[in-house]
Amino acid sequence: MDVVDPVVVESAAVLARHLRQGRDRRLAVLEWFAEAGMAAQSGAVQVPEPPVAGVREAVVWVLRGTMSHRLLEVARGAAGAGEEAADALYEVTGRHIAARPYRGAANPALVRAALEADEEVPDFKGVVHLVAAIGLGAQEVGADALAQAFAAFGWFGLTAEDWAQMLGAVERGESLPVDWGLLQQRADVLGPVQQASDEQLLRARTVLLGLRMFYGLYAMHALFMPDTPTLAALRARIDEWACFRSWTTSSL
């Protein structure tokens, strides 16, 4: 009797752990991919890698279904289509965000401060302006609206006033021009995945798994984990390394 390949046995076992009736197989493939990237416990068999082509297909499928991607598709369709299309873009984007508030990249310090002051947690209504800037062009949105959008994400620790001052100077020609094309490039989430090599996908998994601890630390800080000088110093070092921003940017 021929011996069954151990890789086949382990692959079947990991699929059985993640597949359930009615569940899309692509979600199971992603969980398999994540599990294969983790170090095996002592005495356990290392989970084999799933087919990378299947992983790529699953990642693209998930990204296509995100609210961010759907809104960007609407925004790109509104480009150059006149005022009615622009108004429709704002209406559709606002409706989506109102129905499902986006807090995926919430600045933990802002969330904690809002909770401590018994205020509403930022709901990122500024995302409407960011989506419009990507689809219609930053010049059509204006400095003040973009300043609110950038500040909502807590980028670089700058306030809306800081952003408004800098973007206003650019708008008035008092500062060096900004290459807004970079905004459109960063908004393309499908292209990098589709063009990435197998090795790049594996490396991206390693980075994301390695950054989970940092993300968890910040999430717990936002949700009132008791703070200490040591934890504050650790977050300051993480900020210096830009690790948390790397996680949130890649998770968008």
Image: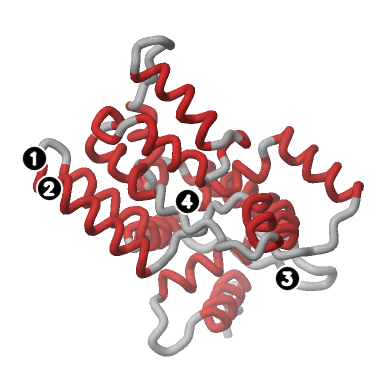
Q: Which mark is residue 120?
A: none
Secondary structure at badge 1 equals: loop
Q: Residue at x 17, y 49 (%)?
A: 87
- Of badges 3 and 1, nearer the viewer stands 1
Residue type at mark 2 is Ala
Comes first in the chain, label 4 or label 3:
3
**As rendered, which of 52 and 82 lies closer to the eye?**
82
Residue type at mark 3 is Val
Q: Is residue 169 left or right of residue 12?
A: left
Residue type at mark 4 is Leu
* Residue located beneath label 2 in the image: 85
* Residue located beneath label 4 in the image: 252
Comes first in the chain, label 3 or label 1:
3
The answer to whether mark 2 and mark 3 are in CB contact below 8 A is: no
Res 146 quadrant in image? top left
Q: Residue at x 39, y 62 (%)?
A: 62
Res 118 quadrant in image? bottom right
The local crowd at label 4, few if under 14, some if 14 to 19, many if 20 or more residues have their Cα within 10 Å, is few
Q: Residue 84 appears at what percent x and percent y?
A: 9, 47
Residue type at mark 1 is Gly
State whether residue 172 is above or below residue 239. above
The answer to whether mark 1 and mark 2 are in CB contact below 8 A is: yes
